[in-house]
Image (cartoon, rainbow, N blue to C red):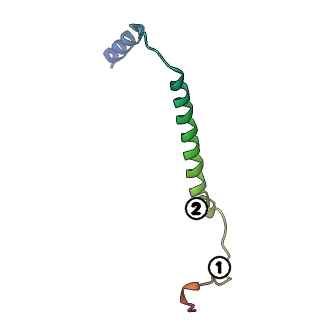
Amino acid sequence: MKLFFILFFLLVLSVVPAYSYLDPGAGSMLAQLIMGGVAGLVVLFKLYWGKFKSLFVKTDSTTPEKDNSSQTE
């Protein structure tokens, strides 16, 4: 385990410059990725909020629930 940490720190300390180019489109792509992730989390939260809330809400068992499946028109 000690050897692993020594090798890890040697690799971290031996950083060389990459000489790479980031165009303006890379920033907008990163912004879209972040906004899409946030939108996905909001939709996921909205989908499961009712199930989560039903764990804490007490239902009234004295009132009969309506069953519309047996009615014919």
Q: Position of residue 18 (x, y in %)?
A: 41, 11
Q: Nearer the viewer, residue 43 or 8?
A: 43
Q: Quadrant of the N terminus?
A: top left
Q: Is residue 58 left or right of residue 12?
A: right
Residue under label 2, please give it: 51
Q: Secondary structure at mark 2?
A: helix
First in sequence: mark 1 vs mark 2 = 2
Q: Amino acid at mark 1?
A: Ser
Q: How packed is label 2: few (under 14 Cα within 10 Å), some, or many (20 or more)?
A: few
- Depth check: 29 or 72 in front? 29
State the image coordinates of residue 3 (x, y, percent, origin top left).
Answer: 31, 15
**In the image, is 17 to the left or to the right of 28?**
left
Q: Position of residue 44 (x, y in %)?
A: 55, 51
Left or right: residue 28 versus residue 10 is right
For the point 68% across and 83% down, the residue is 63
Task: For marks 1 and 2, give the CA distance.
Answer: 18 Å
Rendered image: mark on residue 61: 1
Residue furthest bottom as drawn: 72
Quadrant in the picture for residue 24:
top right
Amino acid type, residue under disc 2 in the picture: Lys
Q: Considering the image in quadrants, where does the C terminus appear?
A: bottom right
